[in-house]
Structure formats: structure tokens, C-alpha cells
């Protein structure tokens, strides 16, 4: 944060002569930019607090309301506001539906929702009905009905929703997207991606700290373990697909000239969470007797209307280093994140990989060239700055965001479709057309820009 504040001060010095404020010096300068965007946050746990910290560094945002059912989180956020020299905000959290009181405020233009997954769709639907530009954490929905609820509410109200999928803004992802747009890989053929992340100490803790220290979950635990682990206990599905699918869906023009058509999924047996409980809590711990439904590795293969395939892997219950497993493969070459390697026919030495670094530097995205120093320290390697930057700029303009409600629905639909495919022994499942045919004429968002 200190390095980001230093960068902010440098920007202030360079922009003072022309009367522009830091962060807005590169932002929208029309009439709507005269007043700050008034933002309310629903859910200020660890993720919501991270969003608050980043929003507090913007001169074009005013935090006007906070909601959380944990009074301690509201107190901590109040301290952050005080330290930032900001005025006190309205706070809500007396009961689970207190967020509706926040949505009733005419001092809130936009909301950021960072709550447990089961609340995402109900809160987003209510926010859109209230006319609040909606930023929604991933995943957006857990059932097909919820996916349609999001789409139908947007279309009925005209209120926009942006899925806050931050991996789309990772530096290497945006560089590869630029390579895709400039035809470096040729016609696209195949993608691999996923969420491969050892979450055992996220799914269990001792009730006193957010990560690890015990093997409790549910009411005996704290933070994500209070609610996230139950999905592994009760659902055999890829419950968290968007970190992997989001970036490749943009590269493949999903919902904008292309669409997801079908999916087949398979799951391995489940041993990882049980073994963790036994190792950390002993074979006699009550949780050691539970049977977790979710397979340790879930593999889904998707087909698109243009003939590409996408393999998504969910692997969160076993010991492993972190990787989203990206591969982008075209008729002229491919990039693989594991091994940091690229091969381009006619450019690379035949049958030998190139180190990806020089290629990624050559095609570095304009946004990272412009804001990279400032983004450092914002969270997740800088991605959190860029996803919130896009949300704020789109909300100020009251225009469609780069990751919209149709993306939120299509990407989140992997969860219920994978669950059904696994239950039916790998049978093919078909994606609803959430755009109702408009995907054929929608043009891709202009991602290769230095604005947002």
C-alpha cells in the first residue's frame, strides 16, 4: 500500500499543472465524472475489506454505506475509513436481510457484493431491482435457475451487473489476450484452464483464525470455512469454475460471436479432505467420519459453437502447488503457463519451447504498462486494482461492463451442469443460450486499450 501511495503522490505532482486528480487523470472526463461514484459494500469479510482498501485509494469514489452481519468487521472497516481521512458511512447488519436497507439508500450508486456464494444471486437480483450498478464476486450463481434470475433481472430493469473475475486482468493473461487478438497463435483450437489450489486450510480452521490451525468447519469455524466447506460435503461439481474459464472465454469470444454449447464432466474419488482431517485432527475426530461428496479432481470438457474445446480442472482438496493450468492453443502455436513456455511455428526453433517471458513482455497489455506500478500491492498480484478500475469506470458511465451478466451466467453454469453430468456418469449437458441468440451479433469488448 505504501508503494501505491507513493505512486499516487507522483501522479499528483505530474497532473497538478492541468488540474486533474490522480486516478481520474486517465479516467472518464465527461459530465458524469464531476461527482464521485457513491459505492456501498455488502459483505466486508476478508475479500470485501480488500475491495474497500482499494476503493479508498481512489479520488473518484466515495464509500457511502457498509453492510455485514459481523459487527467486528464493520468496526475494522470504520477504522480503515478513519485512517484514510474519510467521513463515517451508514452501516447495516442487524440481520441477514439488512442489505436491503442499504439498497434503499439514494446515496448509493453502485454496490460491491462479497458474501458467501448462496447469497450472491439473491443480493445481486435485489441490487439490480433497486437500480444499483452491481459488482458481484465469483461465482455469480450455483444453479441454472439462479443464472436465469440474473439475466432476467438485468433485462427487466436495465441495470448492469459486472462479475468481478480478477484473473481476467492478470498480467500474463492480458498479454496472451493481446497475442490472440493480433493473431499470433492463428485460428484458435483448444484451451485448458482450471482452479488447482490446495484449499484444505481454507476449508478447515480452529474457529479463531481464518486459515488452518484445526479441522473445524461450519458453525465451529470462522471465515470461509463457515460456509465454503459444505459445498465439498454435499455437491459433486466444479463449484468454482470462473478463475479458469473467464480468461479463455474472453479469448474465444464467448457470448460475442461464439458461445458455450455442451459439457461433459467426470470426478475422481474423494480422499483428500478426509486424509487432512485424520492427519491434523486424528482418526477419532468427529469430522473424520464424514463422507465428502466432491471428487478430489473434477475434469470438464466444453465445446463451443466455433469448434474449440476447453478443458477445465477443479483440484482443491489435495496437496499441490497453485496453478490455473492455462493453455491457449491455435493453428500456429500455443502458450502454457506451467513451465512458462510458448511455441510459435516459424518463430520458435522447431520442436523446442521458447521461454514465455520475452513474448509476454513484447505483448504487455497497455493497461499494465500504464497502471502497473500503481496496481502493485492491490491484491492478487495487482489484478484487484484492474478489476475494480473497470467496474468503477463502467459504473460512472452507466454502460455495459467488460464482464457482463451474460458472462456471469454462462461461466457460472459450469457448476450445475458439471454436477448433473457427473451424476449421469459423464453424460453431455447443454448450455442454455443466456443471450437468447444475440451472441451471434454481439461484438467483442475492446479489451486492448489503456483506459479500462
Image (cartoon, rainbow, N blue to C red):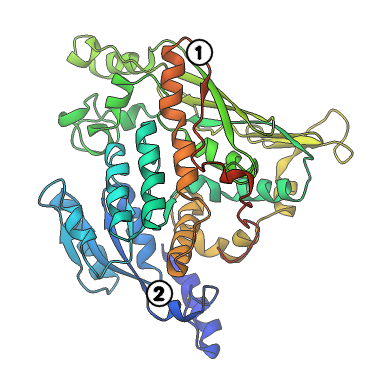
The answer to whether one can see residue 279 in this image is: yes
Image-based side of 345 in relation to 169, left or right: right
Dot in front, 1 or 2: 1
Horizontal and vertical percent for residue 329?
A: 72, 33
Instruction: Determine the secondary structure under disc 1.
Output: loop
Residue 304, placed above or below residue 23: above
Q: Quadrant of residue 391?
A: bottom left
Residue 164, placed above or below residue 324: below
At x 63%, y 40%, the residue is 258
Picture quarter with the N terminus = bottom left
At x 60%, y 55%, the residue is 445
Horizontal and vertical percent for residue 361?
A: 71, 52
| Mark carried by residue 59 | 2
Residue 181, placed above or below residue 196: below
Residue at the left extreme, as displayed: 94
State the residue in front, 27 or 383.
27
At x 60%, y 59%, the residue is 368
Q: Quadrant of residue 316?
A: top left
Horizontal and vertical percent for residue 259?
A: 59, 37
Image-based side of 371 in relation to 155, left or right: right
Disc 1 marks which residue?
426
The earlier-in-sequence mark between 1 and 2 is 2
Mark 1 neighbour density, 10 Å: few (under 14) some (14–19) many (20 or more): some
Q: Do tag 1 and tag 2 residues touch (Cβ < 8 Å)?
A: no
Amino acid at each position: 500500500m505504501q508503494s501505491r501511495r507513493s505512486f499516487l503522490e507522483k501522479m499528483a505532482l505530474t497532473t497538478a499543472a492541468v488540474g486533474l486528480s490522480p486516478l481520474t487523470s486517465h479516467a472518464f472526463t465527461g459530465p458524469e465524472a464531476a461527482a464521485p461514484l457513491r459505492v456501498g459494500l455488502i459483505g466486508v469479510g476478508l475479500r470485501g475489506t480488500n475491495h474497500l482498501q482499494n476503493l479508498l485509494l481512489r479520488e473518484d469514489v466515495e464509500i457511502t454505506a457498509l453492510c455485514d452481519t459481523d459487527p467486528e468487521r464493520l468496526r475494522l472497516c470504520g477504522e480503515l475509513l478513519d485512517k484514510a481521512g474519510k467521513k463515517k458511512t451508514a452501516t447495516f447488519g442487524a440481520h441477514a436481510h439488512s442489505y436491503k436497507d442499504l439498497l434503499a439508500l439514494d446515496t448509493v450508486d453502485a454496490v460491491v457484493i462479497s458474501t458467501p456464494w448462496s447469497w450472491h444471486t439473491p443480493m445481486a437480483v435485489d441490487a439490480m431491482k433497486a437500480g444499483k450498478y452491481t459488482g458481484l464476486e465469483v461465482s455469480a450463481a450455483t444453479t441454472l435457475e439462479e443464472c436465469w434470475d440474473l439475466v432476467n433481472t438485468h433485462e427487466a430493469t436495465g441495470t448492469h451487473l459486472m462479475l468481478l473475475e480478477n484473473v481476467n486482468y492478470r498480467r500474463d493473461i492480458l498479454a496472451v489476450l493481446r497475442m490472440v487478438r493480433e493473431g499470433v497463435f492463428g485460428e484458435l483450437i483448444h484451451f485448458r484452464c482450471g482452479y488447482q489450489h490446495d484449499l484444505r486450510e481454507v476449508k478447515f480452521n480452529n474457529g479463531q483464525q481464518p486459515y488452518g490451525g484445526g479441522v473445524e468447519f461450519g458453525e465451529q469455524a470462522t471465515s470461509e470455512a463457515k460456509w465454503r466447506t459444505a459445498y465439498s460435503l454435499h455437491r459433486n461439481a466444479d463449484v468454482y469454475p470462473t478463475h479458469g474459464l473467464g480468461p479463455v472465454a474472453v479469448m474465444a469470444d464467448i457470448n460475442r460471436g461464439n458461445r458455450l454449447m455442451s459439457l461433459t464432466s467426470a470426478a475422481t474419488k474423494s480422499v483428500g479432505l478426509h486424509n487432512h482431517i485424520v492427519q491434523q485432527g486424528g482418526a477419532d475426530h468427529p469430522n473424520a467420519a464424514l463422507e465428502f461428496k466432491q471428487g478430489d479432481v473434477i475434469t470438464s470438457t466444453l465445446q463451443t459453437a466455433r469448434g474449440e474445446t476447453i478443458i477445465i480442472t477443479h483440484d482443491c482438496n489435495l496437496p499441490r502447488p497453485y496453478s490455473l493450468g492455462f493453455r491457449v492453443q491455435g493453428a500456429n502455436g500455443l502458450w502454457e503457463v506451467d513451465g512458462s513456455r510458448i511455441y510459435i511455428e516459424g518463430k520458435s526453433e522447431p520442436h523446442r519451447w521458447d521461454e514465455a517471458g520475452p513474448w509476454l513482455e513484447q505483448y504487455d497489455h497497455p493497461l499494465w504498462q500504464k497502471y502497473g506500478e500503481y496496481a502493485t500491492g492491490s491484491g492478487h498480484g495487482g489484478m484487484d486494482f484492474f478489476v475494480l478500475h473497470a467496474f468503477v469506470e463502467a459504473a460512472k458511465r452507466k454502460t455495459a461492463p467488460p464482464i457482463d451478466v451474460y458472462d456471469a451466467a454462462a461461466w457460472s453454469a459450469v457448476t450445475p451442469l458439471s454436477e448433473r453430468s457427473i451424476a449421469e456418469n459423464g453424460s453431455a449437458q447443454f448450455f442454455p443460450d443466456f443471450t437468447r441468440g444475440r451472441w451471434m451479433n454481439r461484438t467483442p469488448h475492446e479489451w486492448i486499450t489503456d483506459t479500462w
